Image: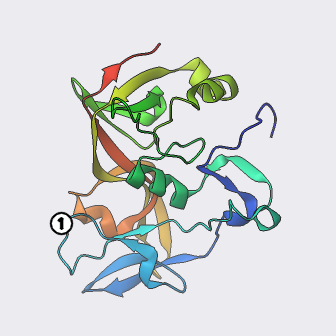
Amino acid sequence: MTGYTTVPYTIAFANELVTNPIAFEPFAGRLRLAYQPSQPGDWIVPPRAEPWRPGILRARTRDLRDKPELRGPERMRKLNTRRQWRCMDKLLCQVCGAPAMDSGSHLIPWPLTKTVFERTGLNRGRTNAPPTCWSCIPTALEECPMLRADFALYTVQAVESVGVLADLYRPGIFREPILTSHNVFNSWDAPRYHPRALAVAKVLELHGMKHVGP
């Protein structure tokens, strides 16, 4: 790990990465992606989805961060999907894993780069990057080359879960999955693509954004 002294909370370790095979399997009269063998908790059910919807398959990762004797070396270019999801659900800092919301103002500090942010309105936009608490922002800027090259800091009033970042597949002749798109936004409101998606990160829409940094 050259140049880093802190391993961000959302970064994966070698032994957390899972390479279980995926395949298309029948479900409710159609095909959906599934791990082989599958487990009941593999799929994420979108908000307000009908019970018969297949859900979205979430990429498997282990969580061994608190077990240094088992986790192996860090993989700075790999994301731990489970911890990214936890950060988005609970608004945790992606660097230290503690709550990111400022206890005084109740605003959420959110450093963003162009590669992880898409503006959807005057004071709102979508991102797959979790927030970063005020205490960790100096460390992130010092150690992350991407932030130093392209960085804007906002405070955020509220968030909304809007979908996932996912790889999309189609079934081949023998139902083998064939990759068609990599790291594309898949909205909760687009169920047509859910059976074909392997979700690698949760996406939030940020509301009440105010620019406070470079």
Q: Disc 1 on helix, strand or loop?
A: loop
Q: How many other residues sit within 10 Å of disc 1, few (<14), some (14-19) or many (≥20)?
A: few
**Amino acid carrying mark 1 in the image:** Arg
Q: Is residue 25 above or below residue 90?
A: below
Task: Give the residue drawn at x 47%, y 47%.
Answer: 92
Q: Which quarter of the rendered picture does the N terminus lie within? A: top right
Which residue is found at the position 46% from the left and 42% from the top?
A: 130
Location of mark 1 (residue):
48
Q: Which residue shows up at 46% across the image and 40% down it?
A: 100
Q: Quadrant of residue 73?
A: bottom right
Q: Is residue 173 above or below residue 178?
A: below
Asked whether the viewer can see residue 172, the reply is: no
Q: Quadrant of residue 107?
A: top left
Compared across the picture, whether 14 is left or right of 111 comes to right
Residue sitting at the far front: 104
Q: Is residue 187 visible?
A: yes
**Where in the figure is residue 158, as x and y percent of width and height?**
27, 39
